[in-house]
Amino acid sequence: MHAEESAPPMTQVEKVLYTAKTHTAGERVNGVARSSDGYLEITLSTPGTAGSGTNPEQLFAAGWSACFEGAVGIAARKMRIAIPADVAIDAEVDLYTTDGAYLLQARLNVSVPGLEREVAQTLVNAAHQTCPYSKAIRGNVDVMINVI
């Protein structure tokens, strides 16, 4: 049996909005990742070492928090809630091991100053349901989202 035959069917795509293309070589130790459009060129290092580059966990934290902030904005527009310009998200992504397996766990600390806590929580809950990064890791990564 071919892998294609045993894999679940892919979701029918209505419209591709954007495709990110990168090339990475050299692993986490002195590796380099570059985007096809030239806007991103980064040196990679192993987390927790004195290397001069970033690591996949930091990249994931930056990407997820940026996407999540956008999802908060979309939720606010749908609910007709004005959100302040200084919304901020602090993301923490842990790389850990259990029984010899490498895993991730994550926290998002979301600041929505000027909104009542219940309103901010409603926006954050809606964003977590619609953010593509949140959807991608749902059921695979332990996640805690805090309104601060």
Image (cartoon, rainbow, N blue to C red):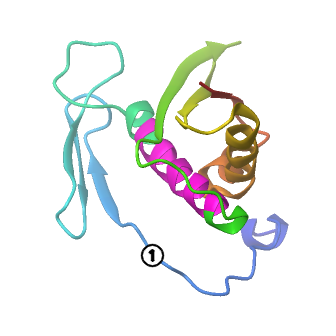
Instruction: Give 25 or 35, whichever is nearer the viewer.
Output: 35
Residue 2 image offset from top left, x and y in percent: 76, 69
For the C terminus, the image quarter is: top right
Instruction: Give 74 or 68, whichever is nearer the viewer.
Output: 74
Residue 5 image offset from top left, x and y in percent: 81, 72
Q: Can you tell which quarter of the image residue 7 is in?
A: bottom right
Label 1 crowd bin: few (<14), some (14–19), many (20+), radius 10 Å: few
71 part of magenta stretch? yes
Residue 47 image offset from top left, x and y in percent: 36, 20
- Please name the residue that numbered disc 1 is placed on: 18
83 vs 120: above or below = below
**Dominant SS type (magenta):** helix
Q: Residue furthest bottom?
A: 14
Question: What range is drawn magenta here?
Answer: 61-76
Which residue shows up at 68% across the image and 43% down it? 124
Disc 1 residue type? Tyr
